[in-house]
Image (spheres, grey):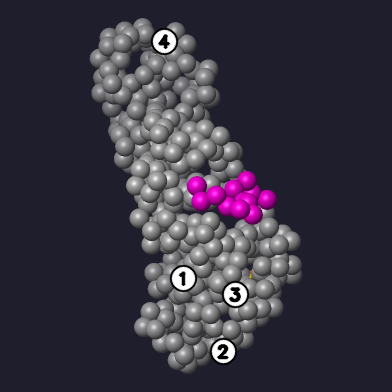
């Protein structure tokens, strides 16, 4: 509770622009009083923090495929879109594949939505692929291929929020713009001993202000990437490696023995279940696929025909979700082993049924696809096809 009050106090003071006011609290939690203040009342030496972090980054930066000494705004933007909610190791192969298929923003803008979704298949959060394609068209058609070079301009692109805009502006254009993702939140909360929950909106406001107060005017892209790298490799959520941390001398959480309790951990929400009945309908080595709407889960992607399970008989499920031409020639419907797939907030449990039929003409939004080809399906459906 104490931490929450402190954070609210700080955030309000920051937002009210109480620059120079004595805002340290009984717990002496850091309170920046100017954007590039050099030293705080609790001895966080910002210039030294910047120097140490950049020096560490020069020696320890992760070798990531989208990093370059001469960053291309298109490549930076593409990587930041892919990295939203997704880990670097997962993104790396998709990034390489994407750049090969769509080497610049014009190539991406000219591609069909279907090709973009197919290239994105398996990466998850499919709304991002739609936004990516819409933004590429906007940049190609309205800005003649040149990405906006300000945070405000970048935030006008579909799918670009404040974090992504700050990352792209600082890395691609050298703009001194702050960032705040999960890793950076944790690092800043520890350095400045913010004990309030980082899921509270007031705390988020405080952390944004702290991020703004530490970013230098020069090498801001490197500095932001250094914060990301420190959070990913040293200042880990569960076991931070404080004895090798370049910021150990500045870190208030370390000085006050608070490393284990910051950031405050939110109560784990029990994952929800989603029960679906999925159909593997085959004809002459081909499998029946259906294309989803452009909204919601797996937006616009191809899938195995499926529906939320509600106790209906399998015959009535088939009648409901299969084209009439398929239903007419459907052979015996057999139950296969169930498949489970974990999404971020939901566990999807599939009851899988399998049947053969004649290969008939199909209405729009359905297609036959060769089973042995790499199909552009979300991972959940790839899993089903490998299992049955
Ligand atoms: S000293 Fe420890 S807690 Fe503080 S920033 Fe470094 S790794 Fe994180």
Which mark is first along the chain, 4 or 2?
A: 2
Q: Position of residue 246 (x, y in %)?
A: 70, 70
Q: Are marks 1 and 3 in contact (CB under 8 Å)?
A: no
Whether residue 286 is situated above or below residue 156 in the rendered picture: above
Main SS, magenta residues: loop
Question: Circle 3 sits on which residue?
Answer: 191
Question: Circle 4 sits on which residue?
Answer: 283
Kindly report the distance in space between the C-alpha atoms of the residues bearing marks 1 and 4. 56 Å
Looking at the rendered structure, the secondary structure element under dot 1 is helix
Q: Position of residue 278 (x, y in %)?
A: 39, 26
Question: Circle 1 sits on which residue?
Answer: 208
Furthest toward the front, the residue is 144
* Crowd around label 1: few <14 · some 14–19 · many ≥20 (10 Å): many
| Span colored in magenta | 63-74
* Crowd around label 2: few <14 · some 14–19 · many ≥20 (10 Å): some
Q: Position of residue 59 (x, y in %)?
A: 74, 61
Question: Circle 2 sits on which residue?
Answer: 41
Which mark is first along the chain, 3 or 1?
A: 3
Look at the image and tell me whether residue 193 can be seen.
no
Q: Please identify, in this view, whether the residue under mark 1 or under mark 4 is nearer the observer.
A: 1
Ligand 1 under 8 Å from disc 4 Cβ:
no
Q: Position of residue 223 (x, y in %)?
A: 60, 66
């Amino acid at each position: 509770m104490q931490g929450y009050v402190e954070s609210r106090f700080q955030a309000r003071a920051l937002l009210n622009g109480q620059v120079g006011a004595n805002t340290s609290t009984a717990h002496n939690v850091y309170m920046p009083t100017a954007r590039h203040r050099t030293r705080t009342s609790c001895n966080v030496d910002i210039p030294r923090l910047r120097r140490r972090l950049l020096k560490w980054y020069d020696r320890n930066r992760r070798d990531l495929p989208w990093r370059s000494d001469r960053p291309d705004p298109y490549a930076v933007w593409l990587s930041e879109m892919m990295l939203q909610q997704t880990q670097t190791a997962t993104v790396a192969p998709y990034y390489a594949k994407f750049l090969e298929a769509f080497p610049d923003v014009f190539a991406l803008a000219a591609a069909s939505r279907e090709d973009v979704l197919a290239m994105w298949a398996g990466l998850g959060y499919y709304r991002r692929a739609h936004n990516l394609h819409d933004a590429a068209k906007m940049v190609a058609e309205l800005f003649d291929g040149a990405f906006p070079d300000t945070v405000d301009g970048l935030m006008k692109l579909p799918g670009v929020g404040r974090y992504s805009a700050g990352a792209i502006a600082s890395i691609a254009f050298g703009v001194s713009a702050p960032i705040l993702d999960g890793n950076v939140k944790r690092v800043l909360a520890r350095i400045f001993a913010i004990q309030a929950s980082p899921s509270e909106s007031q705390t988020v406001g405080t952390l944004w202000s702290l991020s703004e107060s530490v970013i230098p005017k020069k090498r801001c892209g490197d500095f932001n990437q250094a914060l990301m790298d420190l959070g990913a490799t040293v200042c880990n959520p569960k076991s931070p490696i404080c004895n090798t941390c370049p910021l150990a001398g500045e870190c208030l959480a370390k000085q006050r023995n608070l490393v284990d309790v910051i950031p405050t951990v939110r109560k784990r929400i029990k994952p929800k279940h989603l029960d679906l009945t999925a159909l593997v309908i085959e004809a002459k080595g081909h499998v029946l696929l259906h294309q989803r709407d452009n909204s919601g889960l797996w937006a616009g992607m191809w899938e195995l025909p499926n529906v939320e399970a509600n106790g209906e008989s399998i015959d009535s499920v088939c009648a409901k979700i299969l084209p009439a031409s398929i239903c007419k020639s459907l052979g015996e419907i057999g139950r296969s082993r169930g498949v489970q797939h974990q999404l971020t907030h939901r566990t999807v449990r599939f009851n899988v049924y399998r049947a053969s039929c004649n290969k008939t003409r199909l209405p729009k939004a359905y297609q036959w696809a060769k089973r042995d080809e790499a199909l552009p399906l979300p991972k959940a459906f790839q899993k089903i096809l490998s299992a049955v």
